Image: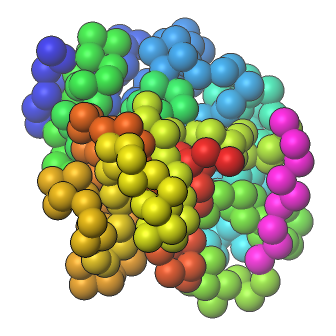
Amino acid sequence: MTKIGKDLALAKQLLQSGQLVAIPTETVYGLAANGLNPEAVARIFEAKNRPSFNPLILHVADTAHARALTSNFPPKAQLLADTFWPGPLTIVLPRHASVPDIVTGGLETVALRVPAHSLTLELLRSLPFPLAAPSANPSGYISPTQPLHVAEQLNDKVAYILDGGASSVGVESTIVMVKDDEVYLLRQGGISEETLMAVVGHIAHAPDAHNQPLAPGMLLNHYAPGKRVLLGNLSLLYGQHYHERVGVLAFKEPLPEVPLAQQRILSPKGDLAEAAANVFAYLRELDKLDIDLIIAEPVPHNGIGRAVNDRLQRASEK
Ligand code: TXA
Ligand code: MG
């Protein structure tokens, strides 16, 4: 199995020679490569089996480095960066000419983020280039929130896994695009809409155009485990599927009819941040059980709960 450890010098050396290293962030683990080296970035797409039109986020150590990768950094972007970086917010801005096409999928914009993880920030500060990094999972599967998740799924496709413990936020970054003076929400994530709104006033929702979504990760059927997932009222779903072996992903309370070993409770105390931190790991655990399907219930639809519901919806059957 791929080596897992905290060796920053090794991670740095591998990245400098164009190899792939899994990096911890507060949201999920990323599969990182030198973001200015098209060949290294191509290895990410290969390892993940990711469609090449789906652009990547560039991770940088601070706002100054982010600015250098854009051709325009408007005041609203500065405000967002000052307020939320380092943190789970990705800002899409007009790209600088130095950003390779393979990173942006040919778009005229680039996605940028300063992650809030001390080990990865130290790595970024030591490197003369940004790190292109999507979530470190095979395309379409559940995102990894622990080093072992990465090892299980990407194994020898990644040269080294930098161990930064379990991701504290647990769902991916919120993605916004800043265009002129308007902020568009492209993906729900670790920073809630309410929190964004309190800072920038108005948020516009991007049209979810079919097949050409503004954030191509918004394609449906993302984050799906191998097993069928049905989302809805747990009692009703159980009533329809009691004759099958059912796994349960509940928000606060288990379903009395199902053995506890086949259930995962996102947050017994009803805390949405805790639910977000657990959702991907629990989906993975349920996926490994000897069951026929997973039934899941939505969490309260506010704050980071919106991002959790978004991921559950994408994991489930339509
Ligand atoms: O929390 C996160 O954002 C994690 C960690 C590793 O930073 N990364 C992550 O990357 O979730 P990924 O590749 O799984 O999702 C990035 C999303 C994709 O949906 C992609 O389409 C979108 O960002 N994206 C990237 N560049 C874009 C651009 N220029 N315009 C619009 N969307 C963009
Ligand atoms: Mg992803």
- Name the residue at 34% across, 12% down: 157
Give yes or no for residue 210 being in the magenta stretch: yes
Whether residue 181 is visible to the viewer of this picture, yes or no, is yes
Whether residue 169 is visible to the viewer of this picture, yes or no, is no
Q: Is residue 11 left or right of residue 43?
A: left
- Return the x and y of residue 313 as percentages of the image width and height: 59, 55
Give yes or no for residue 77 being in the magenta stretch: no
Q: Is residue 20 left or right of residue 188?
A: left
- Return the x and y of residue 154 as percentages of the image width and height: 33, 20
Dominant SS of magenta comes to loop
Highlighted magenta segment, given as a residue range: 203-211
- Name the residue at 54% across, 16% down: 49
Q: Quadrant of residue 26?
A: bottom left
Q: Quadrant of residue 291?
A: top left
Q: Could you tell me which quadrant the N terminus lies in?
A: top left
- Return the x and y of residue 308 as percentages of the image width and height: 49, 64
- Return the x and y of residue 284 as percentages of the image width and height: 31, 42
Count of numbered marks = 0
Seen from the viewer's position, the closer of residues 241 and 252 is 241
As drawn, 154 above or below 134: above
- Name the residue at 52% across, 52% down: 230
As drawn, 16 above or below 271: above
As drawn, 49 above or below 198: above
Seen from the viewer's position, the closer of residues 128 and 52 is 52
Q: Is residue 131 left or right of residue 154?
A: right
- Name the residue at 18% across, 17% down: 2
